[in-house]
Image (cartoon, rainbow, N blue to C red):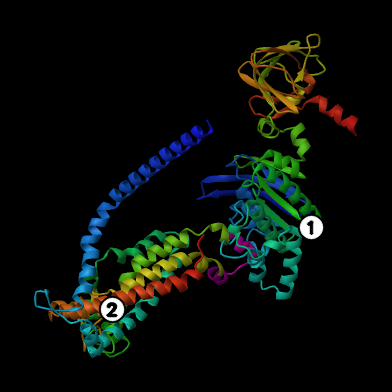
Amino acid sequence: MNEAAVSLGSDAAKLIEKAKKQRRTKNLIKGLLFLLPSLVFFSIFLFYPMIRTVYLSFFLTNASGAPTVFVGLDNFAQIFSSPLFLKSLKTTFLFVLYTVPGTIVISLFLAVIANEKLRGIGMFRTIFSSTMGISVAAASVFWMFLFHPTMGWLNQFLSIFGVEAIGWLTDPKWALLSVSISTIWMNIGFTFLILLGGLQSIDSYLYESADIDGAGYFYKLRRITIPMLSPTLFFVVTVTLINAFQTFGQVDMLTRGGPQNETSVIVYSIYRDAFVNYQYGTASAQAVILFVIILGLTLLQFKLGERKVHYQ
Amino acid sequence: MSYIELSNVSKSYDKQRSVLNGIDVSIEKGEFFVLVGPSGSGKSTLLRLIAGLEEITGGELHMNGKVINHLPPKDRHLSMVFQNYALYPHLTVEQNILFGLNAKKVDKKEQKQRLHKTAEMMGLTELLKRKPRQLSGGQRQRVALARSVVSEAPLCLMDEPLSNLDAKLRAHMRMEIRQLQKKLGLTMVYVTHDQVEAMTMGDRIMVLNDGKVQQVGKPIELYNKPANLFVASFIGSPKMNMGRAVIKGQQLVIEESLFIPVKAADVIDIPKNKRLIAGIRAEHLFKGTSEEKTHVLDVINVEQLGNETMVTFEVGGEFWTAKWLGQQIVHTGDRVPVQLSVEHMSFFDADTGKLIKAASSLKQKEGVAI
């Protein structure tokens, strides 16, 4: 009788095990079905191009982009010995250095002042975030007029003070800075909006408690606002950094990489190699390098930055 | 001169929506003063006016005899405990406690001294290096208290500090806060919506409703002589039983269904033929026996609490609850004999809600007790 009970027990256990397995398979299929649309789209527009890029970076290609001769790492060796690529690399890093801190600091300042409860503050919030709704092309045209050497408002404004006209987009000394300024302006809308959202989610009790404790404005800013905003800041820095590395539109519109390749950032250099010079192999190699740089910097940022971020 | 005086203080938003009206009250030094009222009564707003977190729109606020309407919170020498504790989530317990001292640039050595003294008093010594999210509700509450203690401000404001704790911990913290206040000689202004908290903790209580002061007084005073219907129904649990009443000849008629004989002497100060509200506390609705009874009532609900029994009766259109000691064997649907007498009843004006006559039996008892 005892044995019977045991066998019955093991039978039941098998049955339960089988039912569990069935449920797991069912859940897996269901999950995959939900993922299917995004998997399909990612595969077509992201995974396949990525793999194809890596593949192409090892080949020479004909004018239509079909691989012809396998050259191994020759493409990489060639671009790293090309002064043009090295220059574009340097330009890109300088561009990132100009735009990322600038965007964050200015947006943070605007967000902090727009977070005050004042009459008509909604109007300012709308104005500060409005650049988010302007496309890169439209903004570039607008800045092109501002930067115009003779008719541009910037030079006209400077001439009031007797300052000589500056070739904003034509002078090699100024071109990258000018593109950076217009980029900061374009980025402010989005960054401002995210930071304002972050500021508004900070509990007002914290400030009231600090008021009673006698904390001054800057003490509160340093000890409450910045630490409580750190998750948002971290997000904004990551996104802005990646965006800065991928800048293309305003360079194409404002300077076309010139003067003297001063503003030829890496994505613009890729574009030129691929679609002007029909060098798909070296263009792919550059794209792979850009990918590695962005991936590396983002990983580094997560490793270093995450420690200083206070999640609620 | 009292420590804090509010004279004709009012608060309105956008010059129209009035939240507080003509508040006149004075709070003595070292007093535990409780502001109690239902939600939306303006009690938290009043506290924030005293703290300086909101601007007073009318009247004057004095502290130590000086007008302080215009002073920012930090110059009012007070500390405050918020309902959600307002702990800084990114700082450790130690940094949280020292936040205010740091802001005021108190000497580092003194900071350390005060920190250790306070942490020891509040039992936080082991937890100083932890972040708020690693603490339980009770521990967070203690940190919030410690922050207020360490400031050594003579006045402490508390805004419903116990409402996020479970019942057991709440009862314990009630006692702890009371002891702390006595030990440090703090003047405390304490906001709560819980009348039990108000009764058990306060030296004096102010009942607020709709932005107006209903009554200010000692807890027992409020219980025994509620100034109006609102206080009568708000203070005390279960609430005072009430019913529409009128005196007709030698009889008091309640809800047109209870007839109680009255002597002329009992109702000498009560106007005849006026619409009244009669109220009686649950503990004065005595149990009767088949020989000794004045009325027989229908039981509609029974709650057994172990040490006492709550029996709810239907009187006209009202539900009256009686609180009887011990475990009574009563069932829903029974008809139970009770003893009711006029001397335990309070009478209110049905139109204005004002008290006309408090229960006369209490005066005699007080006299006996003294």
Proximity of marks 1 and 2: CB atoms separated by less than 8 Å? no
Left or right: residue A247 versus residue A273 is: right
- Of the residues shown, which amino acid type is indicated by label 2? Ile
For residue B67, say whether it is visible.
no
**Classed neighbour count for the residue bearing mark 1: other residues with Cα under 10 Å, few (<14), some (14–19), many (≥20):** few
Q: Which residues are magenta?
A: A208-222
Q: Position of residue B118 (x, y in %)?
A: 74, 62
Q: Nearer the viewer, residue B300 or B257?
A: B300
Callout 2 secondary element: helix
Q: Which mark is residue B91?
A: none
Task: Give the answer, above or below, for where B226 lies relative to B6.
Answer: above
Residue B116, compared with residue A13, is above or below; it is: below
Q: Give the residue at mark 2.
A: A289
Residue shown at 57% from the left, 45% from the top: B19
Image spot of residue A287 (x, y percent): 24, 76
1 or 2: mark nearer the eye: 2
User: Is most of the magenta stretch helix, strand or loop?
Assistant: helix
Residue position for label 1: B184
Q: Quadrant of residue A286?
A: bottom left
Which residue is depicted at the point 30% across and 47% down?
A: A29
- Examine the rendered structure and indicate whether residue A81 appears above or below residue A35: below
Q: Label 2 neighbourhood size at 10 Å, few (<14), some (14-19), many (20+)?
A: some
Q: Residue furthest left?
A: A63
Q: Is residue B257 visible?
A: yes
